Amino acid sequence: MKSGFVNIFGKPNAGKSTLLNALMGEKLAIVSHKVQTTRHRIKAILTDPDYQIVFSDTPGIIEPKYKLHEKMMQAVKGSLEDADVALLITDARENPEESNAIFTFLNLKAPALVILNKVDAVSEDDINKSTDFFKTQKYCKDVIVISALKKKGINELLAAILNLLPEGPAFY
């Protein structure tokens, strides 16, 4: 059996909560266009006879300007410690170098998959450029192309996660 902790990181409104909902097959996390809707880690457990994944949706990564922001960034830092796999989600419509700066700053210990989200809103050429860019980064094990809202690419993402998860007993 494979089991482990998979934590989702990214900028505000990159689609972290939408991705968690798509992976779980139901609405567990609040989704809003308002920045910083997720203020604490939200955990969800996906159990199958062959695996158990404990997902953690984290607040969007920002430069803290207020006490609330500092608390939210502490939740992100705590998530770095217990991850077996990190999902680094980025909006395909944005410059990949912006997300890269954040992902590099995280200084991850866990293997990371870069999740190129909202690909239904960009050209194939843009997808290829971003994919090629992220594949050259040291932290990136693979790039998975998805549309979390339309649930496109979710099965491929789950397979990539399972490929990186360690063998172990179920936690719950």
Image: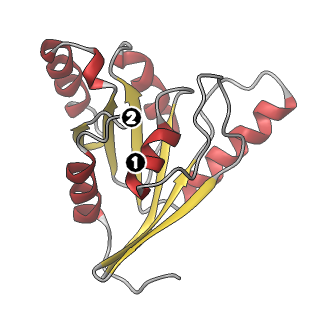
Answer above or below: position of 32 versus 106.
above
Q: Residue furthest bottom?
A: 169
- Quadrant assignment for the N terminus: bottom left
Determine the CA span between mark 2 and mark 1.
7 Å
Q: Nearer the viewer, residue 91 or 66?
A: 91
Circle 2: residue type: Leu
| Number of residues whose C-alpha sits closer than 10 Å to that of mark 1, classed few (under 14), some (14–19) or many (20 or more) | some
Answer above or below: position of 85 versus 1.
above
Task: Tell me where residue 30 appears, x and y as whole percent.
Answer: 62, 41
Residue at left 23%, top 38%?
Answer: 143
Mark 2 and 1 residues: CB-CB less than 8 Å, in contact? yes
Instruction: Classify residue 5 as left or right of residue 2.
Output: right
Of callouts 2 and 1, which one flags the residue occurring earlier in the amino acid sequence? Answer: 1
> Which residue is under mark 1?
22
Q: Residue 80: which numbered mark, if any?
A: none
Q: Nearer the viewer, residue 49 or 71?
A: 49
Residue 79 appears anywhere in the view:
yes
Residue at left 34%, top 19%?
Answer: 96
Task: Tell me where residue 149 appears, x and y as whole percent.
Answer: 38, 34
Q: Residue 149: which numbered mark, if any?
A: 2
Residue at left 54%, top 55%?
Answer: 56
Identify the colour scheme used.
Answer: secondary structure
Q: Report the label total.
A: 2
Circle 1: residue type: Ala
- Element class at badge 2: loop
Task: Tell me where residue 60 appears, x and y as whole percent.
Answer: 59, 33
Q: Which of 141 and 55 is in front in this view?
A: 55
